[in-house]
């Protein structure tokens, strides 16, 4: 099936897409490499366009506001009008943010070219109204912010590595499960936190090793029974109930994520990059079987809810797929294949009769 002929809607940001956010009601926000931010409602109608200072990397939405990391800044936009409410420059790049217990937590980092490393990082806390409450500086870079069991957690790089919780006052509590290998990514669900490390280890919140792979872990996506990890070498590894369910090798992975179910199993979407061409694959998350694939522009961002998935591409396209439409197209495609098989079988029989 051609994935791009089965999109529910396609919209253009007008510049390369660097971040997307899909709300549960189906409305979509997309941010670009040059700071453009657009909002479409659940029917695909453009509501507003805003201009932020720099490349948008993370989008998070509350009831009244859109929060974004944009270059060196954390920016707050009115979600109804698109007007900027406030913006704060951080010390170094604004890497990520999280909305937690009524405030904004943002991570910044300073990169030193001579040392070829991050020399200082910080966690900032702002009220939704834009007042800065505190800043907690540290030597380690927090590569990921995770919410787990009513706490906010940081996955850390060198020198300390491991992970730590941070409270509403900015106080850090480091875990006992420290490691010599930096945490590079992470994810959480109701039951666990998963951390990917630079040495290929995937660990949990108890410090237990869940898997040991051949190279650095770049992205982890939770599933109903475990997780799917993307490796630096382009491999996908699915762990289910503590066992390795399936693996897949391919070109470099730019994004991946789980979305709506097909045949009662969630789908897994992955964007790859050959160096000159993008690839998009959709799998059965339980078995790893590819359901559909297409060539594409380079895919840079993904967001999903229970009924839809949104992908943002380098060519400026924001594409949404809908569960019901996807199922209909897959069903039509399957029926077409069966008709072609029957036609081929009939042709073989006629050919055999002629040759007698």
Image (cartoon, rainbow, N blue to C red):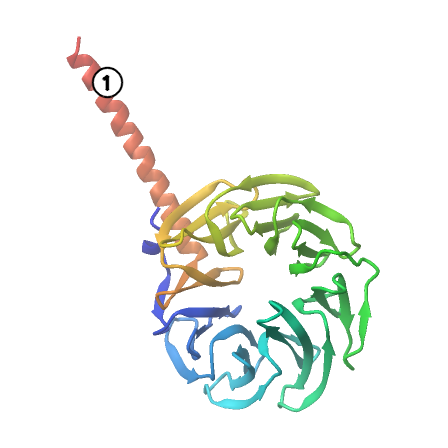
Q: Is residue 308 left or right of residue 228?
A: left
Q: Secondary structure at mark 1?
A: helix
Q: For mark 1, does the 10 Å Cα neighbourhood hold few (<14), some (14 to 19), or many (20 or more) residues?
A: few
Instruction: Identify which residue, 52 or 2, lies in the foreground.
Output: 52
Q: Residue furthest front?
A: 114
In the image, what residue occupies the spot 39% across and 69% down?
Answer: 16
Quadrant containing the C terminus is: top left
Counting labels gives: 1
Examine the rendering and report whether any part of residue 320 can be seen.
yes
Residue 287 in percent (x, y) is at 55, 40
Query: Which residue is found at the position 64% from the left and 44% from the top?
Result: 213
Q: Where in the figure is residue 173, as x and y percent of width and height? A: 82, 70
Q: Residue 353 appears in which quarter of the rendering?
A: top left
Residue at the outermost left position? 354
Give x and y (percent) for residue 289.
49, 40
Residue nearest the viewer, comparing 183 with 57: 183
Identify the image quadrant of residue 271.
Answer: bottom left
Residue at 36 percent of width and 73 percent of height = 15
Please identify the quarter of the rendering in which residue 348 is found. top left
Q: Camera-side residue: 157 or 290?
A: 157
Relative horizontal placement of residue 44, taking residue 255 as reference (left or right): left
**Residue drawn 37% across and 78% down?**
46
Q: Is residue 149 visible?
A: no
- Whole-percent x, y for residue 143 in the image: 65, 66
Residue labelled with disc 1: 349
- Residue 187 vs 87, above or below: the answer is above
Q: Nearer the viewer, residue 122 or 158?
A: 158
């Amino acid at each position: 099936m051609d994935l791009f002929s089965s999109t529910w809607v396609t919209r253009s940001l007008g510049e390369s897409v660097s971040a997307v956010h899909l709300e549960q009601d189906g409305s979509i926000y997309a941010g670009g490499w040059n700071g453009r931010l657009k909002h479409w409602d659940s029917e695909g109608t453009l509501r507003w366009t805003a201009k932020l200072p720099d490349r948008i990397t993370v989008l998070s939405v509350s009831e009244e506001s859109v929060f974004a990391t944009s270059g060196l800044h954390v920016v707050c936009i009115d979600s109804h009008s698109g007007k900027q409410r406030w913006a704060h420059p951080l010390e170094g790049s604004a890497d990520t943010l999280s909305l937690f217990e009524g405030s904004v937590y943002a991570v910044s980092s300073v990169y030193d070219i001579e040392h070829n490393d991050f020399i200082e990082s910080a966690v900032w806390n702002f009220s939704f109204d834009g007042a800065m409450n505190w800043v907690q500086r540290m030597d380690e870079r927090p590569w990921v912010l995770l919410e787990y069991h009513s706490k906010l957690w940081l996955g850390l790089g060198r020198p300390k590595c491991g992970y730590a919780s941070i409270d509403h006052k900015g106080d850090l509590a480091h875990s006992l499960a420290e490691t010599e290998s930096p945490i590079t990514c992470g994810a959480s669900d109701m039951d666990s936190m998963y951390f990917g490390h630079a040495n290929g280890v995937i660990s949990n919140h108890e410090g237990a090793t869940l898997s040991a792979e051949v190279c650095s872990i770049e992205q982890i996506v939770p599933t109903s029974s475990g997780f799917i990890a993307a490796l630096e070498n382009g491999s996908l590894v699915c762990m289910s109930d503590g066992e390795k369910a399936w693996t897949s090798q391919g070109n470099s992975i730019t994004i991946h994520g789980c979305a709506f179910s097909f045949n009662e199993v969630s789908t897994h979407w992955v964007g790859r990059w050959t160096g000159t061409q993008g690839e998009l694959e959709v799998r059965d998350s339980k078995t790893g079987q590819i359901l559909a694939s297409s060539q594409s522009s380079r895919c840079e961002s993904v967001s999903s809810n229970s009924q839809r998935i949104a992908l943002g591409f380098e060519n400026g396209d924001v594409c949404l797929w809908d569960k019901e439409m996807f199922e209909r197209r897959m069903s039509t495609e399957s029926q077409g294949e069966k008709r072609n098989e029957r036609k081929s079988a009939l042709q073989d029989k006629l050919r055999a009769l002629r040759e007698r």
